[in-house]
Image: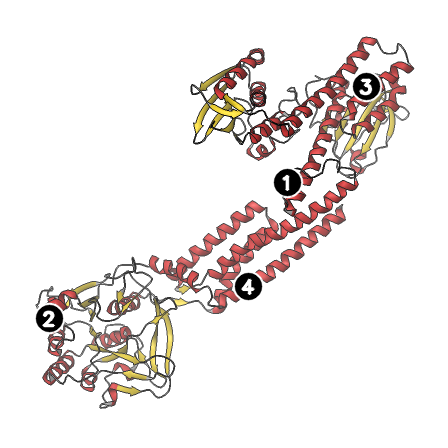
């Protein structure tokens, strides 16, 4: 068995290693692939929204908005208006003015307006104009530049491109874009460069001199091909400060009318751009609320805000992102290997939550954005995959164990039953459940028979701690027969039993621990009794303990063979009581008069009653499971009242009060009255038997939806939640140790479960240790 256990352990570790290798390989691949971008974006966008911060006070937007369009007229406007705007803003000495409006052509209708605009730009010395890429795709290397007069008058140029993701949401941009030989900086960087050039105290960013300065090379400036393909560099994530409308904004028409504060633009970065409906670029962003789009001028302001606030977010490097995804999956796999299923499930869930929280928080903590979808996928897959493997291994183990049980002769009741599922695992479970029921039956019969044995019998572990004794053993040591000896040391209990020849103790700690106990040894105790000590280790579990039987050789040596035979009969199911009866009759026939007739009849009656009781309980349970029910309309209130009356005598003897706390006038249903009465009586019997003296058992009937709830609550010792699953299995006595005086074979609640189930109802248990128990019989309403 140890070899088989090691083999299963090695197989388990091998399967875990293969699963871990495959899953970690998948996570590593997903960490570098773009197949889970949507899931990554969900988490990353949540992180960006958590970065929300107050708008930088040095950024002001002048919006070409709907009120301005309504007041001035249809776009495009005369450039004289823009010249006036620049003059009014420049009068307040801003740091820089960003005109996010493309002036790439000459105004043929009003050429004097171009002169005014260029002159306003030149006088201001703070104006930055945008550059746009013409066309799309790798071959598009043409740029739309401002008209040469404007480019010459502007203090700087910058591109206003963004880099939308596959879902169309703008999360990032490139700080450098343009022909490979001389790319342009982003519009926000150009604004900072212009501000730095006009203020020596201002921290200057790294400015591209070629594109911060004006470009004036004639007409070619408006459509300048690059010296090489269009390139983009220095990708950065936009650290959004907030959603649309986050920054201080003034309407274009209000600025022209002078309806803004006198110092509204002093020392500010002023960005002028379109915000009116249908005018200019509008982008979906991670911080947009209710699908509200953000104007391009606000996106520029967001980028500038992040740069001024020193907030920079970059995508984590591939290797670092892969490590970030692998770490929680490795921890989850180790939990699956080392911890129990429930703890491993909780650990996997906790790792998933931690991974999500870190993914959301790390951009603000260290400026790195991770893509956690691969880790979350691995965590989601780890538990079910490992559970599938363990389930497969369990099914294989169950099949092998069933074959072994069948070879050992425990297949007599494993035939197919109506209603059994065709699922292979359920077949295995049903078969093992039936075989386990046989083993529980056998264990129950052995325990019951052990109690009836006339010889003191003790079961102990290798250290001599008593696990099980019978009443004869308790009488042998002179203690109270009702007080169990479990937990005491058999060495201390039999310390006065010494070898008849040497005077040495027969039962010692060393002999038990080292398995040197002889199978038979004779000794004498302090009371002068000659005893034969029969000692047997458990056959297949040699290290699990010992079975000690004390035989009084003074009066019953000749009965030794019969007692040995009785011990053998114990292992053969329900035949033990009947076999004991036959043994007594044969002894009386061989030795007439040796045993008084009254004692003989009492023993035969006890064995017969034990056998009859077991058989009767079996018959009741079998009838409840197989017989055809006599279904008829009945009133549950009347059934409950009759059952309470029937239990009155038992309750009175035990000093327990049984009451009906709540019940309607009638509770009609359809069922077998006799079986329902028996089931309810079993529940009430248990409640009364386990209630303390002067305790109360409360019964009630209430309606819940389409069902009647018949509840019985006692004030007994309660049932631990982990044991409640065994309540309704046959031969389950959960209070053998706490209430050994309460008899029964553990079939009462099994009958209740069967009857209620066959009536289309269910059983509910609400209990915990020390607070009593409530059994609820849920039955359908009568039609």
Is the Cβ of the residue at disc 3 closer than 8 Å to that at disc 2? no
Mark 1 → mark 4, Cα distance in angstroms: 39 Å
Residue 727 percent across, percent down from the top left? 60, 30
Q: Which mark is residue 26?
A: 4
Tell whether 693 sits left or right of 622: left
Task: Identify which residue is drawn at 65% across, 24% down.
Answer: 620
**What residue would you read off at disc 1?**
420
User: CB atoms at circles 1 and 4 under 8 Å apart?
Assistant: no
Question: Which SS class for mark 1?
Answer: loop
Instruction: Report the side of 74 relative to 521 (left or right).
Output: left
The Cα–Cα distance between marks 3 and 2, rounded to whole angstroms, is 116 Å
Q: Is residue 541 above or below residue 749?
A: below
| Residue depth check, mark 3 versus mark 1: number of the one nearer the observer | 1
Nearest to N terminus: mark 3 or mark 4: 4
Front residue of 224 and 707: 707
Which circle marks residue 72 in the picture?
Answer: 2
Which residue does the numbered mark 3 point to in the structure image?
581
């Amino acid at each position: 068995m140890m070899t088989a256990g090691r083999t299963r352990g090695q197989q388990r570790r091998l399967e875990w290693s293969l699963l871990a290798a495959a899953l970690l390989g998948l996570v590593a691949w997903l960490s570098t692939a773009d197949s889970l971008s949507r899931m990554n974006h969900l988490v990353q966008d949540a992180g960006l929204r958590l970065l929300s911060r107050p708008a930088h006070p040095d950024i002001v937007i002048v919006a070409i908005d709907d009120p301005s369009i309504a007041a001035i007229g249809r776009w495009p406007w005369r450039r004289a208006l823009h010249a006036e705007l620049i003059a009014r803003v420049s009068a307040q000495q801003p740091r820089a003015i960003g005109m996010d409006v493309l002036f790439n052509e000459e105004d043929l209708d009003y050429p004097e307006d171009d002169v005014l605009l260029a002159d306003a730009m030149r006088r201001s010395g703070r104006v930055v104009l945008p550059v746009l890429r013409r066309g799309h795709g790798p071959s598009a290397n043409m740029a739309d530049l401002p008209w040469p007069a404007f480019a010459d008058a502007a203090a700087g140029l910058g591109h206003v491109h963004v880099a939308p993701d596959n879902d169309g949401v703008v999360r990032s941009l490139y700080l450098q874009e343009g022909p490979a030989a001389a790319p342009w900086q982003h519009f926000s960087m150009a604004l900072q460069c212009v501000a730095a050039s006009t203020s020596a105290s201002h921290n200057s960013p790294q400015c591209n001199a070629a594109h911060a300065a004006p470009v004036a090379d004639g007409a070619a400036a408006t459509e300048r091909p690059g010296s090489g393909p269009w390139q983009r560099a220095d990708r950065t994530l936009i650290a959004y400060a907030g959603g649309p409308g986050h920054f201080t904004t003034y309407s274009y028409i209000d600025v022209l009318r002078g309806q803004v504060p006198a110092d509204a633009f002093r020392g500010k970065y002023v960005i002028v751009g379109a915000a009116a409906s249908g005018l200019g670029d509008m982008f979906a962003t991670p911080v947009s609320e209710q699908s509200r789009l953000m104007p391009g001028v606000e996106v520029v302001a967001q980028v500038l805000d992040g740069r001024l606030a020193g907030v920079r977010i970059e995508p984590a490097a591939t290797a670092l992102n892969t490590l970030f995804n692998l770490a929680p999956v490795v921890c989850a796999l180790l939990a699956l290997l080392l911890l129990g299923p429930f703890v491993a499930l909780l650990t996997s869930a906790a790792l998933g939550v931690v991974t999500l929280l870190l993914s959301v928080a790390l951009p603000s903590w260290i400026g790195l954005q991770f893509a956690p979808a691969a880790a979350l996928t691995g965590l989601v897959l780890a538990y079910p995959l490992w559970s599938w493997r363990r389930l497969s291994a369990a099914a294989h183990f169950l099949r092998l164990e069933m074959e072994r049980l069948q070879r050992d002769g425990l297949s007599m009741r494993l035939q197919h039953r109506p209603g059994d599922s065709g699922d292979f695992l359920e077949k295995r479970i049903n078969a093992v459940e039936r075989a386990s029921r046989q083993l529980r039956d056998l264990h129950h019969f052995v325990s019951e028979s052990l109690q009836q044995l006339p010889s003191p019998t003790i079961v102990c572990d290798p250290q001599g701690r008593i696990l099980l004794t019978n009443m004869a053993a308790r009488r042998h040591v002179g203690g109270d027969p009702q007080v169990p000896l479990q937990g005491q040391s058999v060495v201390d209990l039999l310390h006065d039993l010494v070898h008849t020849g040497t005077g040495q103790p027969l039962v010692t700690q060393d002999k038990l621990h080292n398995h040197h106990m002889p199978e038979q040894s004779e000794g004498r105790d302090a009371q002068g009794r000659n005893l034969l000590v029969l000692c047997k280790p458990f056959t297949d579990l040699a290290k699990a303990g010992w079975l000690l039987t004390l035989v009084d050789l003074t009066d019953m040596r000749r009965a030794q063979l019969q007692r040995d035979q009785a011990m053998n009969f114990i292992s053969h199911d329900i035949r033990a009581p009947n076999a004991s009866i036959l043994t007594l009759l044969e002894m009386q026939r061989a030795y007439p008069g040796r045993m008084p007739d009254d004692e003989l009849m009492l023993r035969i009656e006890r064995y017969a009653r034990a056998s009859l009781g077991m058989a009767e309980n079996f018959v009741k349970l079998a009838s409840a499971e197989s017989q055809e029910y006599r279904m008829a309309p009945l009133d549950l209130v009347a059934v409950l009242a009759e059952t309470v009356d029937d239990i009155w005598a038992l309750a009175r003897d035990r000093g327990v009060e049984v009451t009906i706390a709540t019940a309607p006038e009638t509770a009609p249903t359809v069922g077998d009255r006799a079986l329902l009465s028996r089931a309810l009586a079993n529940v009430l019997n248990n409640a009364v038997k386990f209630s303390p003296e002067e305790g109360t058992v409360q019964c009630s009937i209430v309606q819940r939806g389409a069902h009647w709830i018949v509840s019985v609550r006692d004030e007994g010792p309660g049932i631990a939640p982990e044991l409640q699953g065994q309540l309704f299995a046959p031969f389950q006595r959960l209070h053998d140790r706490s209430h050994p005086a309460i008899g029964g074979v553990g079939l009462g609640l099994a009958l209740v479960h069967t009857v209620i189930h066959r009536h289309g109802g269910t059983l509910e248990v609400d209990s915990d240790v020390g607070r009593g128990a409530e059994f609820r019989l849920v039955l359908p309403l009568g039609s």
